[in-house]
Amino acid sequence: MLPGMAAIGIFLLAVSMITAFKMINEHTLPTITRCTVLAVCTAIVIGVFGMLRLRRWGWVLVTVGCLMGAVMNFFAFHASHIGGYLIQGLFTLLFFLYLSRPEVRERLH
């Protein structure tokens, strides 16, 4: 396993768990929004564990999660103009580009 894959997995695991706990305690959002965010976080956590076992389905879930996270952060930056969203979006886009390299895909089963 490449060290970058492990680092990306740990980062996405932490971000997904923090987001899930925030959504559980958030009562001002509609229920459908909270359930959708919890479902996406669950899929990313499952994908991280699959990717750490070098499974292709885990890599696909994590790659899609990185792309969705980047798009979400860029949209949040566009709506609010808070620089933190832009920085996190760029990091997540960088992780997506790292995971799309042929060297990473060759190591998967």
Image: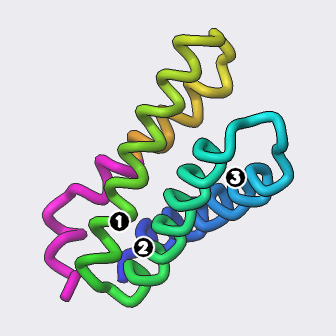
Q: Amino acid at mark 3?
A: Thr
Tell which circle, 1 or 2, labels the residue nearer the N-terminal end: 2
Report the amino acid beneath label 1: Leu
SS category of the residue bearing label 2: helix
Residue 30, placed above or below residue 38: above
Q: Mark 3 or mark 2: which comes first in sequence?
A: 3
Q: Percent from the top left, x then y, of residue 20?
A: 70, 58
Reading the image, the residue beneath label 2 is: 47
- Where residue 62 appears, as percent x and y from the top left, is 39, 63
Give the crowd class for mark 2: few <14, some 14-19, many >=20 residues within 10 Å: many
**What amino acid type should be assigned to the residue bearing mark 2?**
Gly
What secondary structure prevails in the magenta region? helix
- Residue 46 in the figure: left or right of residue 79: left
Q: Are marks 1 and 2 in contact (CB under 8 Å)?
A: yes
Q: Which residue is mark 3?
A: 19
Location of the N terminus by quadrant is: bottom left
Callout 3: SS: helix
Q: Quadrant of residue 86?
A: top right
Separation of residues labelled 1 and 2 (CA atoms)? 5 Å
Q: Is residue 1 above or below residue 14?
A: below
Callout 3 touching callout 1 (CB < 8 Å): no
Q: Residue at x 60, y 42 (%)?
A: 33
Is disc 1 placed on a helix, strand or loop? helix
Q: Which mark is residue 61?
A: 1
Cα separation between marks 3 and 1 = 17 Å
Q: CA distance from mark 3 to mark 2?
A: 16 Å
Q: Residue at x 14, y 76 (%)?
A: 106
Is 98 a magenta residue?
yes
The one nearer the camera, 20 or 84, is 20
Quarter of the picture holding the C terminus: bottom left
Mark 1 surroundings: few (<14), some (14-19) or many (≥20) residues within 10 A: many
Q: Tell me where the magenta segment starts and ends, as one range.
A: 95-109
